[in-house]
Image (cartoon, grey):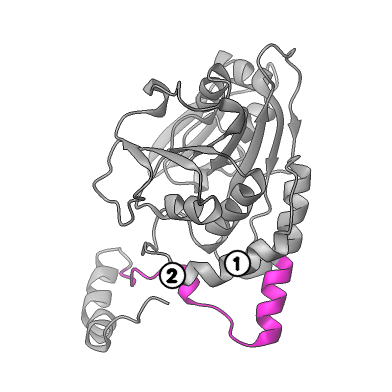
Amino acid sequence: MHPRPPILMERLRRRVLGPLFDRLGYDLVPASPDWVHRPLSTREVERLLSGAAERLAADLAAAGIPAGAVRADVDRFWALIPEAPVRQRRGGSGFNGALQLYVAMRALAPRHVIESGVFRGLTTWVIRQACPDAAILCFDPDLSGLQYRDAAARYASGDWSAADLRDIDPAATVAFFDDHVSQGRRVIEARERGITRLLFDDDAAAHRIHAHGGPAHPTIAMVTDAAEGREPIRWLRNGRAFEQPADDPLVREAAACIARAHAFDDLHRATGYAPARLTAVTLHEAGAPPALPHAGKAR
């Protein structure tokens, strides 16, 4: 478990720094990940783990991902996460997002993983715990903030779409996107490279995208819900107006690539931790006729 902040620093935060930042309109909170807070009694731990496993098993089935012993994976993650080498409270994945990624990667069992959007390195660590023998390729325009660097992974500061991937087997690859880039664009790029198994963080339905930081659009939810002739989707975020055109050709192209998309349950009711936003996407194989995607539950 991560150690508690020093008592003197905590008193200083509460009595001096916290009130000062509050007057300036900011919150000052310890950089402790949410998983340092957890139930300890046997019954409550069991309820949390069994509830999470039940929902994850249902999500994997709905996403068309064959699953093994989901409850065993959840138990293993529960034991692993206190040792995570990354401390983050704002941004990145919390307990629920890390758990979803861990269980999904265990079920998919890829030999190669493309990770676009690394941030501090937590998701790289989660992927390594789930797939100890996988070759992981990490892409992020700024790698200076890493708190965890995987010794066996390959890192690049460019965009994944410009990388030479001739040495990987697309059929044995999973691409994980948490990079705040148009998810419709990522679908098309993956299809062009023959990669058909994708995971997306921060997928958001049109009516909820205003609540998401750094909105990248069109999201998978927008792509699978696209319809001709609808008005543009507009929203306001931090004083800036955004718009997703109703007749965006990228949306139509991405929709034709998707065979199935399923948004996982956010796990908040099961665990009490901050909601997660993982979506699993399966693309049509190259040469397969385009069809309407099979969409999962609303995001």
Name the quarter where the N terminus is drawn: bottom left
Q: Is residue 30 magenta?
A: yes
How far apart marks 2 and 1 lie (CA) works out to 12 Å
Q: From the top left corner, tell me how far across and down residue 76 is, in percent.
A: 60, 67
The residue positioned 27% from the left and 88% from the top of the image is 7
Q: Quadrant of residue 299?
A: top right
- Residue at the spot 68% in from the left edge and 20% down from the top edge: 285
Point out the stretch of residues depicted in magenta: 28-51
Q: Determine whether, in the image, residue 241 is placed left or right of residue 5.
A: right
Give whichever of 123, 150 is nearer the camera.
Answer: 150
Q: Nearer the viewer, residue 6 or 105?
A: 105
Q: Is residue 282 magenta?
A: no
When the figure is inspected, residue 31 is found, relative to residue 109, above or below; the finding is below
The amino acid marked with disc number 2 is Glu
How many C-alpha atoms fall within 10 Å of the one at disc 2: few (<14), some, or many (≥20)? few
Which residue does the image show at 38% across and 71% down from the upper left?
32
Q: Circle 2 sits on which residue?
A: 83
Q: Identify the mark nearer the N-term, 2 or 1.
A: 1
Q: Residue at x 39, y 63 (%)?
A: 89
Residue 261's label in the rendered image is none
Mark 1 neighbour class, 10 Å CA radius: few under 14, some 14 to 19, many 20 or more? some
> Height in image: 69 above or below 244?
below
Residue 224 image position (x, y, % from top left): 68, 29
Q: Amino acid at mark 1?
A: Arg
Residue where numbered disc 1 is placed: 76
